[in-house]
Image (spheres, rainbow, N blue to C red):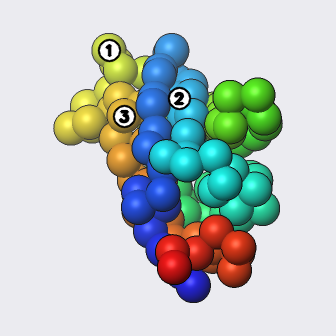
């Protein structure tokens, strides 16, 4: 069952220079294994496309049931130097939440 990420999780974003940090938290802890399985570096890079020109790193935070992605070269040089309408990390976080992921049978709604 494919669902948009925003149906099972929310995101927080931060930015520093040309690097955006995206953290994803499931609404329910039982969805964390789905996030770990589906939100790979490759899936995030593919979904965010050309917005991220540098390295993408993923950190697993199991005690918080969270994943954090550090996206380098993703803010057109930085918030204060970019001519983009929304060069902040929150724009990338919102875009990431539109990614569709596969839910495992055990975490699907009944």
Q: CA distance from mark 1 to mark 3?
A: 15 Å
Q: Earlier in the sequence, mark 3 or mark 2?
A: 2
Q: CA distance from mark 3 to mark 2?
A: 9 Å
Q: Is residue 23 visible?
A: yes
Q: Position of residue 2 (x, y in %)?
A: 54, 81
Q: Position of residue 56 (x, y in %)?
A: 71, 41
Report if the CB atoms under discs 1 and 3 are less than 8 Å apart: no
Q: Nearer the viewer, residue 26 or 20?
A: 26
User: Label 1: how many residues lie within 10 Å, few (<14), some (14-19) or many (20+)?
Assistant: few
Q: Residue at x 66, y 36 (%)?
A: 66
Instruction: State the residue position of label 1.
Output: 80
User: Which residue is outermost to the left?
Assistant: 85
Q: Is residue 32 above or below residue 46?
A: above
Q: Residue at x 35, y 29 (%)?
A: 88
Instruction: State the residue position of label 3.
Output: 90
The quarter holding residue 60 reads top right
Q: Nearer the viewer, residue 30 or 62?
A: 30
| Quadrant for the N terminus in the image | bottom right
Q: Is residue 35 above or below residue 110?
A: above
Q: Specify whether 45 is left or right of 81.
A: right
Q: Nearer the viewer, residue 47 or 11?
A: 11
The circle drawn on residue 20 is 2
Helix, strand or loop under label 3: helix
Mark nearer the viewer, 1 or 3: 3
The circle drawn on residue 94 is none
Q: Residue at x 34, y 41 (%)?
A: 91
Mark nearer the viewer, 1 or 2: 2
Mark nearer the viewer, 3 or 2: 3
User: Which residue is outermost to the front?
Assistant: 110
Q: Position of residue 55 (x, y in %)?
A: 73, 40
Q: Earlier in the sequence, mark 1 or mark 2?
A: 2
Helix, strand or loop under label 1: loop
């Amino acid at each position: 069952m494919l669902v948009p990420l925003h149906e099972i999780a929310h995101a927080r974003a931060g930015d520093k220079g040309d690097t955006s940090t995206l953290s994803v938290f499931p609404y329910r802890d039982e969805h964390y294994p789905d996030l770990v399985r589906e939100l790979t570096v490759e899936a995030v890079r593919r979904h965010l496309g050309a917005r991220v020109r540098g390295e993408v790193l993923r950190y697993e935070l199991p005690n918080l049931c969270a994943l954090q992605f550090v996206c380098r070269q993703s803010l057109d040089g930085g918030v204060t130097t970019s001519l983009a309408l929304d060069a902040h990390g929150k724009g990338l976080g919102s875009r990431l939440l539109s990614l569709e992921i596969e839910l495992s049978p055990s975490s699907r709604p009944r």
